[in-house]
Image (cartoon, grey):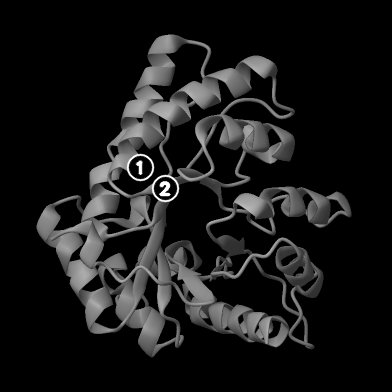
């Protein structure tokens, strides 16, 4: 299987695997979902044609398993757009050189997975401090150059989400991307990770010019269908001002596995309202 054969054109609205993590981890067989079946679930249950995978929900890294996910995506006309990668005990900004090298290596291990799946990007966690210290930025540039040298040679971008450490500092993220190269390093803005204060919209605006996708983190829906955690209409306007076209990948947390599907559908309805 080659990377070039993958359906690489994402739709305007996508589904993050993490939205269904409570079903993936559910003990009840009638609620449980395998990430293997996420492409089918996205299309048949939610009417969505774009998904973001999650590395912690992969049952195995065996090529045959990855090929089965990719085959199902092709069967249902779903784009496997990216993958969120959580690498525990890995800090790309670590002052200790041995620790930094371990973090790079653990992230690099996902490059062949992303290539086998035909993904456009995978998301890494930067580590470091917030606010960012100059030494953090320097080490992040070094680590992400090492990562993207390999990933980009295989047609895959690396993405930074506002997900802790220096990634919560948009100025630092911009410095890192400009140093590494915006062709190979992108952002994955999460509209819910800066909180609900006035500065959240400005911070997202500063990440949008580099965005490969957006995490539409929406929850606490009211009777009017609006999300209680963020003003989505305003966030859409911020994204449009930056020229962002999508996808908006739904990443919402249901209170339990039984309400996961309902929560995703509420998020989809709200996105459709403001993306129309």
Decide if residue 178 is on the left or right side of residue 258: right
The reply to whether callout 1 and callout 2 are in contact (CB within 8 Å) is yes
First of labels 1, 2 by sequence position = 1
Q: Residue at x 62, y 78 (%)?
A: 267
Label 1, on which residue?
A: 152
Residue 229 appears in which quarter of the rendering? bottom right
Label 2, on which residue?
A: 157
Residue 24 horizontal/vertical position (percent): 37, 66
Give the secondary structure at mark 1. helix
Task: Judge the density around disc 2: few (<14), some (14-19), many (≥20) Cα neighbours within 10 Å.
Answer: many
Q: Is residue 209 above or below residue 252?
A: above
Give the secondary structure at mark 2. strand
Task: Identify the residue at the far left of this view.
Answer: 64
Task: Identify the residue at the far right of this view.
Answer: 198
Residue 118 horizontal/vertical position (percent): 27, 60
Task: Judge the density around disc 1: few (<14), some (14-19), many (≥20) Cα neighbours within 10 Å.
Answer: some
Q: Is residue 8 above or below residue 100?
A: below
Instruction: Tell how many labels.
Output: 2
Q: CA distance from mark 1 to mark 2?
A: 6 Å
Residue 81 appears in which quarter of the rendering? bottom left
Decide if residue 261 is on the left or right side of residue 218: left
Quarter placement of the N terminus? bottom left
Foreground of the two, 9 or 44: 9
Residue 227 horizontal/vertical position (percent): 74, 74
Quarter placement of the C terminus? bottom right
Foreground of the two, 215 or 89: 215
């Amino acid at each position: 299987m080659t990377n070039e054969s993958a359906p690489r054109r994402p739709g305007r609205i996508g589904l993050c695997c993490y939205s269904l993590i409570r079903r993936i981890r559910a003990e009840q067989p009638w609620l449980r979902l395998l990430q293997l079946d996420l492409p089918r679930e996205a299309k048949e249950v939610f009417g969505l044609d774009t998904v973001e995978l999650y590395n912690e929900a992969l049952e195995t890294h065996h090529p045959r398993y990855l090929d089965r996910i990719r085959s199902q995506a092709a069967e249902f006309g779903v784009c496997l757009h990216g993958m969120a990668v959580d690498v525990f005990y890995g800090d790309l900004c670590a002052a200790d050189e041995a620790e930094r090298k371990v973090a790079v290596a653990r992230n690099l291990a996902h490059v062949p997975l992303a290539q086998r799946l035909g993904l456009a990007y995978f998301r890494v966690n930067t580590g470091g401090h917030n606010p960012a210290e100059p030494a953090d930025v320097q080490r992040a540039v070094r680590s992400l150059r090492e990562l993207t040298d390999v990933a980009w040679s295989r047609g895959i971008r690396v993405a930074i989400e506002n997900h802790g450490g220096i990634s919560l500092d948009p100025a630092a993220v911009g410095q890192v991307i400009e140093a590494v190269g915006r062709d190979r390093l992108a952002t994955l803005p999460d509209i819910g990770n800066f909180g609900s204060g006035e500065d959240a919209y400005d911070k997202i605006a500063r990440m949008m010019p580099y965005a490969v996708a957006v995490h539409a983190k929406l929850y606490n829906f009211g009777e009017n269908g609006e999300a209680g955690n963020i003003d989505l209409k305003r966030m859409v306007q911020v994204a449009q001002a930056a020229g962002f076209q999508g996808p908006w990948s739904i990443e919402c947390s249901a209170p339990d596995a039984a309400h996961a599907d309902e929560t995703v559908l509420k998020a989809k309805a709200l996105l459709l309202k403001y993306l129309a």
